[in-house]
Image: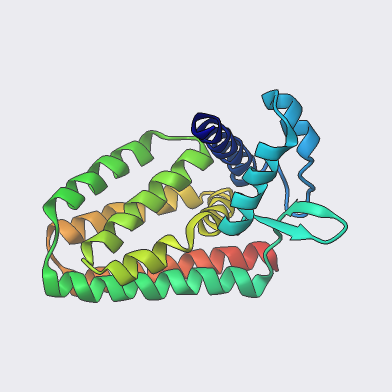
Amino acid sequence: MGSLNFMDNALSKSIAEHITEQIITGVLKPGEKLVELIYAEEYGTSRAPVREAIYLLAKEGLVERIPRKGAIVKEYTENEIYDLLEIRNMLENMAMERIKKHGIDQILLREMKQQLKEMKEIENIHTYTQLNHSFHTCLIKMSKSETIKNMYSQLGWPLLRIQSLSFSNGNNIEKSISEHEIILQLLVDQNMNELTEVLQKHNLDVISSIQKMLN
C-alpha cells in the first residue's frame, strides 16, 4: 500500500509540474478551466492524481477553485501583482542590509556568475525567467536570514509567472541582462551602497513595465 501511495504522489507531482509549465509559458491562460479528464487521459490514470495535482497548484497560488465551476488558472488583480512585486522589492532590500553586515558569500557569487552566463545564452522566456529567479534567490540566500529566505520562497510560482509576463514585453530580456551584469560587478567590487541603489531601480523598473502592460 505504501508503494502505491508513493507512486500516486509522484504522479500527482509530475502532473502538477506539467500544468505549472503550461501556466508559466502561457499555454494555459488566466481564467482557463483545468479539465481533470483531459490530464487523466493524457497520463493514463484515474482522476484522483489529477485532483491532487490541482490541489497542490491551488496551494502554490497558481490555480483557483471556484464553486460549481471547478479549478481555473488564477487571474491576479492589479493590486495582487503590485503587492507581489513590492514585497519582493522589500525582501531584497532587507537582504542587502544583511549582506552588508555578513559579507559576500563567494560560493553563491560563483553560482550567480554561472547563472548570468546561462541567461545570456537562453532565448526561451520560461527558462530565462527561472534563471533570473535563481539569480535573485542567491542574493536572498546571502542574507543568512532564514526568515527572509522563507518569506521570499512563499512568493514562489506567482512571482515567476508575473516576471515571465514582464520578460515577454519587447526588449526587456536584453535590458535585464545588462542590469544583472552591473549587479554582479558591484557584488564583485563589494560596492554595496551603489548595489543597493541599482537593485532598487532594477526592481522598480519591473513594476513600471508591468504597469504599462496592464494599462
Q: Quadrant of the C terminus?
A: bottom right
Nearer to the camera, 82 or 179: 82
Q: Quadrant of residue 49?
A: top right
Q: Residue furthest right?
A: 68
- Residue 25 appears left or right of 73: left
Residue drawn 47% across and 39% down? 127
Residue 12's place in the image compared with 112, above or below, is: above
Q: Residue furthest top?
A: 44
Q: Position of residue 114 (x, y in %)?
A: 25, 40
Nearer to the camera, 205 or 107: 107
Residue 155's place in the image compared with 112, above or below, is: below
Q: Position of residue 107 (x, y in %)?
A: 15, 49
Q: Position of residue 170 (x, y in %)?
A: 57, 49
- Residue 3 appears left or right of 150: right
Q: Position of residue 69 (x, y in %)?
A: 86, 55
Whether residue 177 is visible here, answered yes or no, is: no
Residue drawn 59% across and 46% down? 24
Nearer to the camera, 94 or 132: 94
Residue drawn 21% across and 66% down? 144
- Residue 113 appears left or right of 41: left
Q: Quadrant of residue 53?
A: top right
Residue drawn 51% across and 53% down? 160
Colour scheme employed for the rendering of this structure: rainbow
Q: Quadrant of the N terminus?
A: top right
How many marks the image carries: the answer is: 0
Whether residue 133 is visible here, answered yes or no, is: yes
